[in-house]
Amino acid sequence: GPRRPGLTAALPRRAAGGRSVPAAATAPPLPAGMVRPPRGARLAPPTPGGSRGSGRGAAGHVTPRGRAGVGAMSRRERGSEPGPGSAGAAAEDAGLAEPESPDQCLSLLPWDRFSAWLHCVCVVGFDLELGQAVEVIYPPHSKLTDKEKTNICYLSFPDSNSGCLGDTQFCFRFRRSPGRKVSLCCFLDQLDRDLPVYLKKDSAYYYGYVYFRQVRDKSLKRGYFQKSLVLISKLPYVHLFRTMLKQIAPEYFEKSEAFLEAVCSDVDRWPPPVPGKVLQLPIMGVIMKLRIPTYRDKPGTTPIVQNMHQADAQISMALPTVHEVDLFRCFCPVFFHIQMLWELVLLGEPLVVMAPSPSESSETVLAGSFGVDCISPLKYCSDFRPYFTIHDSEFKEYTTRTQAPPSVILGVTNPFFAKTLQHWPHIIRIGDIKLPGEVPKQVKVKKLKNLKTLDSKPGVYTSYKPYLNKDEEIVKQLQKGVQQKRPTEAQSVILRRYFLELTESFIIPLERYVASLMPLQKCISPWKSPPQLRQFSQDDFMKTLEKAGPQLTSGLKGDWIGLYRHFLKSPNFDGWFRSRQKEMTQKLEALHLEALCNENLVFWSQKHTEVETVDLVLKLKNKLVQADRERLPVKTDTLKKLQTHINDIILALPDDLQDILLKTGTT
């Protein structure tokens, strides 16, 4: 039968190398169980063509900012050498244009390596007259608007009712002020393309990773020492930054700003956050070894970073993940209703998580909103706030009763929200999250009118009726695990796999239908514009479900049709479909390019007027620019062949036209 063009292809990437800065402070004592590298051992692997402290990236491969270098790379640098969890050399096998090694391209400015990971580091303290205040921002040149500083101040401290004595870690998310340019924007966008959808950064938001300390101190007027060390980043790498804070924050509270400066200098020595590569990140005498996932990784797998070489004896910590939270620990208080929560997150319903502390609220919201944990391989496309306070700049917007609650997940701890958000349709109340040593009691779904204060009993407060019948098997499996004292990590793996299989069963019929919207390959003509995708028809899609619905991969019964109808109106469907549209349109553009390359364009030009030939040359040049700008999934040979066609056509023209066309740029 007629062949439809495929939709999956690897895109060419560009990346950059950079500067290194020597540390300037004494390394802190290591936590128990960690091993310090031997004296004289390297804290960071040398970059190709350069070494630690050289101040430059790869020697001999410096290109002007914004332009790509064209150096050859080793198989390992391209990421095509099979490594932990490698999906193989997909791009190489397809003959696509290869990405460049990040240490091969641009020579970065001071602090550019730091900026690839963090925006800045803040210290927030408590002033008796001013209240919470940002005491330190590092590096000093980092820019934050007054609105951003205010958000950071209030979000970096637990609500007073939380009673967090000792050390507490949590995470928050807030809107960036618009209109600010980022020097590494282009470079980070290139890295972003290799990430799974759930880890792609959202340029409109920052994450704040907090290490808060509150201890009694009679020497202070307030009677308590209260301070937060906060990492501000665009990256959702919760586990990485949590681990980093555990290492540096206790030492910082005992020392001064010189220590913070040394920490930032260490981060400015880190390699770029390249997906798919095993990275070694030095931080105050300890090296964290990790791997950022790529979109090529098999869903549901977490490649284990292992010490594979003798030289790895100096590695102090191997991080199993950069972003995942302890899923079972988060959902344990309400795990009898995980399937209902999956539906609520899938449909982008307004959801409030009420918890006793920012630590519990942030972990639970992240477990629900990160597609990797709940609706992977879909991306959660609405807003989510792991920790939200009454001082947040969006407080009025999100709590107004004059309109329906927005599609957002809020994590709150202040009792005031029990009344303020009582009109929200779905509220989860969780108690203290503890490592489950016994089977949790059955928590019933309760009516919203029963939620009066934050002291209400833990439970799910909603009038929502799930579309699908309850899956008793997963509940029994998790209950059995608790009884057998199965580690929470193993319970989380079971739960994550369950969510993945459920989401895949739901999304496969949609993927299959959307693929059918692609025009047939025989419809692509080099002399016409690329054909358009057919329109998505809800009725046509629903008709496909009878024979090719989720029943093929899932045994769950229920109103799947109703669930799909609801999903098609949600922000998650809109985000998913826009992404698929873009992929397919780019594929059509790539196939159109290939069709042009297979034509004898010189012969065509000889049969047409000079005006028509010049018009063709300009259009072909623009095609090349588009292929580069949009990273179209085009084979390298195709682009070279098209350039050869352009050159041959120009050389067949009169000299005066040749001079003009060879100098003419493209739009």
Image (cartoon, helix red, strand yellow):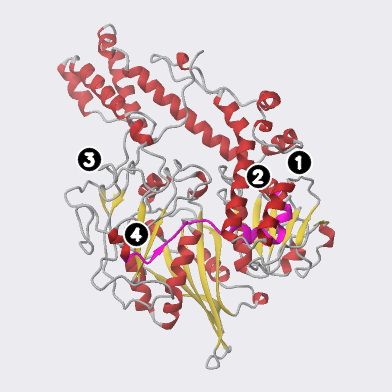
Q: Quadrant of the C terminus?
A: top left
SS type, badge 2: helix
Q: Give, as a three-letter code, the residue at label 2.
A: Leu
Give the alpha-carbon distance from disc 2 to disc 3, as whole Å.
Answer: 44 Å
In this figure, which residue is indicated by the disc labeled 1?
467
State the residue position of label 2: 346
Identify the mark nearer the N-term, 1 or 3: 3
Question: x, y (%) of residue 137?
Answer: 42, 71
237 on left or right of 395: left
Q: CA distance from mark 2 to mark 1?
A: 12 Å
Locate residue 646: give its quadrant: top left
Q: Residue, x 46% and y 53% (percent of image)?
A: 179
Q: Quadrant of residue 279?
A: bottom left
* Residue at numbered disc 3: 72
User: Which image quarter: residue 347?
Assistant: top right
Q: CA distance from mark 1 to mark 4?
A: 46 Å
Seen as rendered, the residue at the extreme front is 484
Hey, what amino acid is under mark 4? Gln
Q: Which residue is mark 4?
A: 280
Q: Is residue 347 above or below residue 610?
A: below
Q: Where are the magenta residues, as a range?
A: 314-339
Density class for disc 4 (Cα within 10 Å; few <14, some 14-19, many ≥20) is: many
Under mark 3, the amino acid is: Ala
Q: Amino acid at mark 1?
A: Tyr
**Residue 387 in view, yes or no:** no
